[in-house]
Amino acid sequence: MSESAAPEGPMVHSARMERAAVAAAEAGLAGLLVTPGPDLAWLTGYQPPVTERLTALLLAPGRRPQLIVPTLERPDAEHAPGARGLTITGWPDGQDPYADLVPLLDPRGRYGVSDNTWALHLLAFQRACPGASFGAFTELLPMLRAVKDAYEVERLAAAGAAADAAYEDIVRLRFAGRRERDVAADLARLLREHGHSQIDFTLVCSGPNSANPHHDAGDRVIQDGDMVVMDFGGLKDGYGSDTTRTVHVGAPTAEERKVHDVVREAQQAAFEAVRPGVPCQEVDRVARQVIRNAGFGEYFIHRTGHGIGVTTHEPPYMVEGEHLPLRPGMCFSIEPGIYLPGRFGVRIEDIVVCTETGGRRLNNTDREILVVR
Amino acid sequence: MSESAAPEGPMVHSARMERAAVAAAEAGLAGLLVTPGPDLAWLTGYQPPVTERLTALLLAPGRRPQLIVPTLERPDAEHAPGARGLTITGWPDGQDPYADLVPLLDPRGRYGVSDNTWALHLLAFQRACPGASFGAFTELLPMLRAVKDAYEVERLAAAGAAADAAYEDIVRLRFAGRRERDVAADLARLLREHGHSQIDFTLVCSGPNSANPHHDAGDRVIQDGDMVVMDFGGLKDGYGSDTTRTVHVGAPTAEERKVHDVVREAQQAAFEAVRPGVPCQEVDRVARQVIRNAGFGEYFIHRTGHGIGVTTHEPPYMVEGEHLPLRPGMCFSIEPGIYLPGRFGVRIEDIVVCTETGGRRLNNTDREILVVR
């Protein structure tokens, strides 16, 4: 895999659609039905609103990709980056778009659909074509978007570097005496200053709130002696960032330092386990074993990671039961944590890409416990 | 229907869940499966992120509502406004949540699912419970969220008044010489100043762009002589606004004035057609007939309206083929338009609530063509 990236353009989308159609054929599918969301954005560059009006891309091996859109959205579709590789047909309000689709489908075929296709649309596909069968994209073709090319890895690396720069800036600011949501607002501003166009989350979890891995950022005033988990990310130039660091306001206690060390060691061990062919669940197991050995097993209450690409949160998942083998180009988070209810929590997260020779981190700020003011 | 609104609280959510379960039973359903989105927000006040991790509310007649959530999101779920009326169970990462659901379902029952439930989840329901059948919420229970109570109508009226206030402000500002996106940014700011917490869209379509009903707001610099369609809305206190006015930079030509008059008359005629028992499609037909009679039939290329509530865009739809009868409490847009390709377009939109005696507009700014600078 070359690390020199070609610019994105119409050819990229045509190549991705071709690759998806070939992968569908290899998986024994008659084709893929792609509705608005990250799959459609990745394949065509088209990002229409997600509504009850059907927009669907049909990819079938050996056929020109066909995009069905509401008539009034057709001008927008025709300006999408990948439009030149598509046949676009419009359907007017009051007409049944599912009936238009039937003649294009193999009446006994098996089709992949986007994970996030609305039930309203899937049920209509099933009704319109009762002899066909449907399965979710990530179950049938889990590797398609999961394996990034060199161009995509560079975009993810740039997003990661921008998130790192935001972290370097935020820890210079004051924490004690300010509300979590004020620090979160600063984080969002800094991510934008470093080139993010979209902020997906800026969790700032202080003191006992740090023990809730899904706490957002609230009105709690941060105090001296607090552990503070900051988990933040978004999109830069169409690709995602997601990183977590846990800092401490003033000097940490020996216990706090110990818990932080265990999480850091778990994260490092999981990172070192990354190489082609290793099942995703192994990354989770390695992190979990370090935490279990230290006696904190029951306090690591979530999976170890998730994929990242044109979204900040997607397959593959680093979780028990996920047997998919890692491949060069897969990008995902490694984010173990320990959460002591009512007291404090620690999480450390980097985005990692699997290369031929092992893992490469796309987040590179210091992972030691950092003391802030 | 009383116009004095009770405040929203836990009882509201319990009452809504009870009402939904009764409606499900009346429709011959074994229950409803509700995933994150507007249905879940309306029923429980809980608004978790929409992800591949299953969160599902099961409503079944005569049974206590049951909410299944990822373990790490359980603390948030327990703080939801409607949580007291729910039994909440968590499932940890690595466990199959669909298997947990099976013992709760009637193996041969028919279930309604939220329109926006991800295909990934619906396909897993179908696989886990192959003897059960599933249908989309709006097809099985189209009236449930569509009919608003007095409390909801007041919230929608307040959102509409705020959007009107933003319009009154924006038309005092300069248009000529500024980019569409700058006017759009002003509109967003004004909506926030008038109490909106979320901006869903601020379309500013000038000159030839006004002929594209789904043009957003771009880099085109607005010029003297332009028609400008402004279509904007969002959420205020959890309920939606959506209104459109078409203004003109400087004096309009006779033809521009004529087209604007036709749209205004069509909008008025459709408004006057609103009363309980009238099918939704009749509202569309009345507007369309006015435009057709004036010779512009082929240039009205979208349906006449859509419902509004906890979202800015939902059933019921004012469209040919929608036979649902209007009922007191239904709230929806009436927004006919004429679009002359490459030249200009006009759209006028108000939110209207159906009352016992006819329509009541929730947008009340002037509908005559307004000249701006």
Image: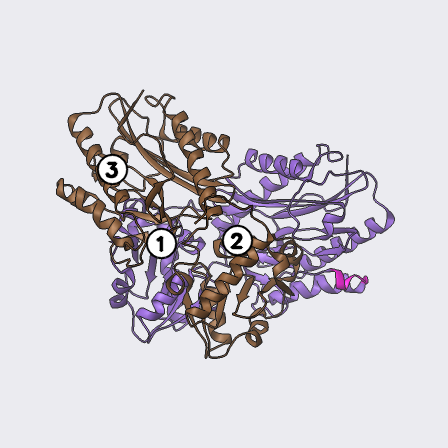
Chain colours: A brown, B purple
Residue B206: which numbered mark, if any? none
Q: Chain of mark 3?
A: A
Residue A211: which numbered mark, if any? 3
Q: What is the span of residues highlighted in magenta in the rendered image?
A: B294-299
Q: Residues within 10 Å of mark 1 (few under 14, many from 20)?
A: many
User: What's the residue at 49%, 37% (across, down)?
Assistant: A196
The earlier-in-sequence mark between 3 and 2 is: 2
Spatial distance from mark 3 to mark 1, Cα to Cα? 33 Å
Which of these two is toward me, B21 or A167?
A167
Spatial distance from mark 3 to mark 2, Cα to Cα? 36 Å
- Does B362 sit above or below residue A21? above
- Does B317 sit above or below residue A181? below
Q: Give the secondary structure at mark 2.
A: helix
Q: Quadrant of the rendered structure where residue A53 is?
A: bottom right
Q: Which residue is mark 2?
A: A41
Q: Give the secondary structure at mark 3.
A: helix
Q: Amino acid at mark 1?
A: Arg
Q: Which residue is mark 1?
A: A327
Q: Residue A19: percent from the left, percent from the top?
A: 49, 61
| Image quarter (top left, top right, bottom left or bottom right) of the C terminus of chain B | top right
- Does B68 sit above or below residue A252? below
Q: Give the secondary structure at mark 1.
A: loop
